[in-house]
Amino acid sequence: MFGQVMAEEVNLDTVVIEDNKAAPEANPYAEPDAPYKAKKLSDSKRTRDIAETPQTMTVLTKEALLDSGKTELKDILSAQPGITLGTGEGGNSFGDRYIIRGYEARNDVFADGLRDPGLITRETFAIEQIEIT
């Protein structure tokens, strides 16, 4: 019987689907099984998942911020690719000054959807996640 295929019936096990609810204190924008991986932005204008958005985005979840041990925004952002800080040595010593992918971003800092243009040193004690777009 060269070249012939024999069909055979196969019985598979039953599949059970359960609801997966996150804990109330968990980040609603992160995946429950991967707390460092954010699934979507907190911005209500961007409703797509991050993976489906045709733009470079970096999201740091609360768990990633806590585990890093860094308490100031400039320390956290200095470890991210594409971000240069203009503070301290040879830069502006009056507060945080960010350069994101070559563009000045001093007025592009938002907290809870509101612009935060001040030249201040920002701390991260009450931040749920940091979104870099």
Image (spheres, rainbow, N blue to C red):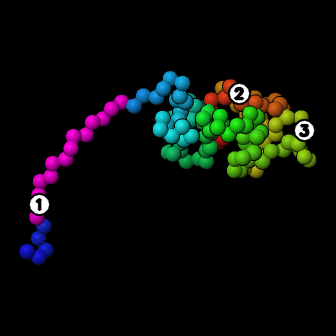
The amino acid sitting under disc 2 is: Phe
Q: Is residue 130 visible?
A: no
Q: Position of residue 17 (x, y in %)?
A: 30, 35
Lower sequence index among marks 1 and 3: 1
Q: Residue drawn at (91%, 47%), measured in percent from left and top?
A: 90
Lower sequence index among marks 2 and 3: 3
- Region in magenta: 6-19
Q: Residue drawn at (71%, 27%), measured in percent from left and top?
A: 125
Q: Residue drawn at (85%, 42%), measured in percent from left and top?
A: 87
Per the image, the residue denoted by label 2 is 125
Question: Is the residue marked by circle 3 packed among few (<14), some (14-19), or many (20+) residues within 10 Å?
Answer: some
Give the Cα distance between marks 1 and 3: 76 Å
Tag 1 and tag 3, C-beta contact below 8 Å? no
The amino acid sitting under disc 3 is: Ser
Q: Position of residue 126 (x, y in %)?
A: 68, 25
Lower sequence index among marks 2 and 1: 1
Per the image, the residue denoted by label 1 is 7
Dividing the picture into quadrants, the one containing residue 113 is top right
